[in-house]
Amino acid sequence: MNNFSLLNDFIIPGSIIIAQILAVLMPVLISVAFLVYAERKVLALIQLRRGPNVVGPFGILQSFADALKLLTKENIVPTNSNKVVFLLAPIITMVLSLAGWAVIPFAPNLVISDINVGIMYLFAVSSLGVYGVIMAGWASNSQYPFLGALRSAAQMVSYEVSIGFVIITVLLCVGSLNLSKIVEAQQTVWFAIPLLPMFVVFFISALAETNRLPFDLPED
């Protein structure tokens, strides 16, 4: 294999794929940081607190400071834990949470992988994410983290069922598992309007699936 063939067959296509992934992940991660900041501000108003207000103007850089602290803090591994599984658990959870964005369309013909079974792919990725939680609890070799992991996994699995039923109603309206076609089918009216009760169920289930308030008990 000559250098020209290696360049055309591997290096250029690989560089394009990496660029597409970064073009999706960077805005997603930045938006998550600002959404967390907005959530903390709203909770502070509800609880009569100030919320983030020190790092950056109005505290808008607090989420980035927390991320930097998380990446640079000391990595503590329990002595009696299964160290390989203990370190793999957060990696698996993070990778699977980001892998789902590969099939999310952002605009016409603007999607990393426009597969015909995009909904099934999302179901598979979200279901595998439960294993990261169970692995983290089991690898710590302590009964309390393990019980907490089981409780968190039970909550995630149970609310996936309700999310699945909601998505089935959307699939019946569209007749396709392709996410791009589902988005295109809502050009006239968003499905959240005629399917408002299902949208409410989906919103509540999504909060429980991601362990956000008021379903954050597994994280306590």
Image (spheres, rainbow, N blue to C red):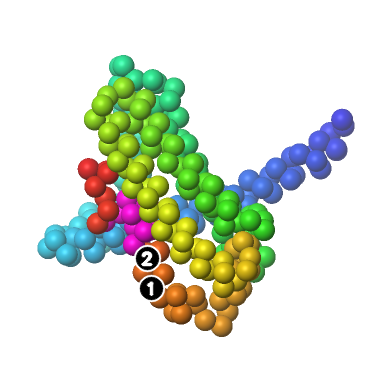
Q: Quadrant of the C terminus?
A: top left
Assess whether residue 209 is covered by the magenta stretch.
yes
Residue at coordinates 87% horizontally, 30% vertically from top-left?
1
Specify start and end residues of the magenta stretch as a single range. 204-213
Residue at coordinates 46% horizontally, 79% vertically from top-left?
194
Q: Evaluate whether residue 94 shows in this view.
A: no
Determine whether the residue tagged by mark 2 lies in a helix, strand or loop.
helix
Residue 147 image point, x, y percent = 27, 33
In front here: 54 or 206?
206
In front here: 4 or 207?
207
Assess whether residue 123 is covered by the magenta stretch.
no
Determine whether the residue tagged by mark 1 lies in a helix, strand or loop.
helix
Q: In this view, does 154 lie above or below 142?
A: below
Disc 1 marks which amino acid? Pro
Q: Quadrant of residue 186?
A: bottom right
Disc 2 marks which amino acid? Val
Residue 192 image point, x, y percent = 45, 74
Residue 212 image point, x, y percent = 30, 54
For residue 197, the mark is: 1
In this image, 48 relative to 88: left or right? Answer: left
For residue 201, the mark is: 2
The residue furthest bottom is 188
In this image, 182 relative to 9: left or right? Answer: left
Residue at coordinates 42% horizontally, 53% vertically from top-left?
160
In front here: 141 or 194?
194
Q: Is residue 16 above or below residue 166?
A: above
